[in-house]
């Protein structure tokens, strides 16, 4: 339960980075929502990897390059799911940009991220 709680805190921080970057680019740079969302997701992913490796899963003894490779595989799926979900929701439902971002991000986090990171990315490989 402690690991799950720590993972949720790390996800909240990474999501803050993701949403902050997305919001700033959307509101002040006038970039398209999908480009803003993709950039935010990239920044949040980097933040999440660093926090998860050192604090959440305490996986510093593992080879960081192997962990990073596994993380990138999972993260590519995460990026594709987030960008696709964001595009689908904004184009077919009429939802506002940031509401669509929230719905997409929560769905992907709950249904995809935690399980794969715990069981694949940061598990102890010996």
Image (cartoon, rainbow, N blue to C red):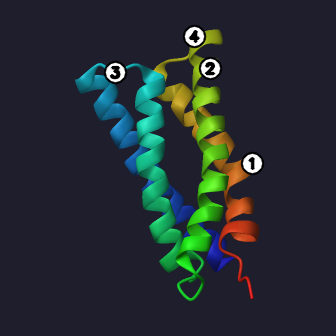
Task: Provide the residue designation for mark 4.
Answer: 94
Foreground of the two, 94 or 75: 75
Q: Secondary structure at mark 3?
A: loop
CA gap between label 1 and label 4 equals 23 Å
Report crowding for label 4: few under 14, some 14 to 19, many 20 or more residues within 10 A (C-alpha): few
Foreground of the two, 114 or 126: 126
Identify the disc placed on residue 31.
3
Q: Secondary structure at mark 2?
A: helix
Q: How many marks?
A: 4
CA gap between label 2 and label 3 equals 18 Å
Question: Mark 1 or 3 closer to N-term?
Answer: 3
Q: Residue at x 51, y 64 (%)?
A: 49
Q: Is residue 120 left or right of residue 3?
A: right
Task: Provide the residue designation for mark 1.
Answer: 111
Q: Secondary structure at mark 4?
A: loop
CA gap between label 4 and label 2 equals 7 Å
Q: Residue at x 66, y 36 (%)?
A: 81
Question: Mark 1 or 4 closer to N-term?
Answer: 4
Circles 1 and 3 in contact, beta carbons < 8 Å: no
Pair 1/3: label in front: 3
Query: Picture quarter containing residue 82?
Result: top right
Query: Picture quarter containing residue 91?
Result: top right
Question: Mark 4 or 2 closer to N-term?
Answer: 2
Question: Mark 3 or 4 closer to N-term?
Answer: 3
Q: Residue at x 56, y 66 (%)?
A: 68
* Placement of the C terminus among the 4 image quadrants: bottom right
Report crowding for label 3: few under 14, some 14 to 19, many 20 or more residues within 10 A (C-alpha): some
Estimate the x, y position of residue 23 in percent, counting from the top left.
35, 32
């Amino acid at each position: 339960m402690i690991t799950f709680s720590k993972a949720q805190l790390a996800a909240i921080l990474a999501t803050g980075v993701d949403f902050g970057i997305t919001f700033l680019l959307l509101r002040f740079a006038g970039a398209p929502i999908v480009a803003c969302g993709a950039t935010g997701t990239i920044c949040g992913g980097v933040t999440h990897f660093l926090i998860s490796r050192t604090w959440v899963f305490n996986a510093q003894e593992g080879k960081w390059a192997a962990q990073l490779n596994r993380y990138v595989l999972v993260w590519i799926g995460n990026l594709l799911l987030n960008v696709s979900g964001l595009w689908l929701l904004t184009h077919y439902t009429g939802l506002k940009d940031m509401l669509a971002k929230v719905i997409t991000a929560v769905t992907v986090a709950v249904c995809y991220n935690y399980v794969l990171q715990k069981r694949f990315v940061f598990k102890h490989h010996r």
